[in-house]
Amino acid sequence: MKAVGFHHNLPIENPAALEDLTLPTPTLEPRDLLVRVSATSVNPVDTKVRRSSAPPEGQAKVVGWDAVGIIEAIGTGVTLFQPGDRVYYAGAVDRPGANSELHAVDERIVALAPTSIDDAKAAALPLTAITAYELLFDRLRVAKGGGKGQSLLVVGGGGRCGVHPYPAGAPTDAVAGDRHRIPPRNPTVVP
């Protein structure tokens, strides 16, 4: 299968920083899905891993963890999905990334992809949506459903994580740089 990866940690400006590769089809673990990848996105995890995590000598490393695609095959222990399902996910950094035609991913970190958006948009969601979710509900302990009577100020609201709190339902204002002005969804007056 075709993939994009690297053999050495080189500056991204170097033409050999990322290479076209031919790799074997991934072998599935019992809970794995084999996904034919239709879109991936680049996020800070990709760039950090590419800069700082050299593959073993003579081997290539594939990055790209946010992905969307169609399930082609399933492992013997899969119970949540079936071949033909369109899924999206933020993969695990301790496994090969999804910048490849086929990708093996554990079903427990996968969801059905939204039908209302195309593959490119769906691939841009997983890691940033997980980060926003964990911030709102795990760290800030916002009540699920928006927290009646609460409001939220998002600093850096023009970034990929900053846009996700809007659908959470709380009155939300965002602060961003000039090129990322976001009109408030539920304007509130802050004295």
Image: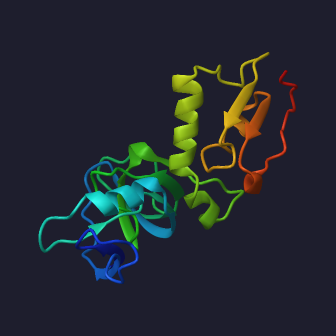
The quarter of the displayed image where residue 123 is located: bottom right
Q: Which residue, as the protein is rendered here, is positioned at the far top?
A: 149
Quadrant placement of the C terminus: top right
The x, y position of residue 74, in whole percent, is 36, 57
Residue that appears at 32% across and 72% down: 5
Front-most of 94 and 45?
45
Q: Residue at x 25, y 53 (%)?
A: 29
Q: Position of residue 179 (x, y in %)?
A: 75, 57
Q: Is residue 63 left or right of 115 when viewed as pictured?
A: left
The structure residue drawn at horizontal position 87% and vertical position 32%, both measured from the top left corner, is 187
How many marks overall? 0
- Percent position of residue 106, x then y: 35, 49
Q: Against 178, is 157 above or below?
A: above
Q: Is residue 33 visible?
A: no
Q: Is 52 or 168 nearer to us in this picture?
A: 52
Q: Horizontal placement of 173 versus 6: left or right?
A: right
Q: Is residue 168 above or below residue 27?
A: above
Q: Residue furthest left?
A: 57
Identify the coloring: rainbow
Q: Is residue 151 visible?
A: yes
Q: Residue at x 83, y 39 (%)?
A: 184
Q: Is residue 119 depicted above or below 58 in this figure?
A: above
Could you say which quadrant of the image residue 58 lies in?
bottom left
Which of the 4 image quarters holds residue 129? top right
* Quarter placement of the N terminus: bottom left
Closer to us: 115 or 65: 65
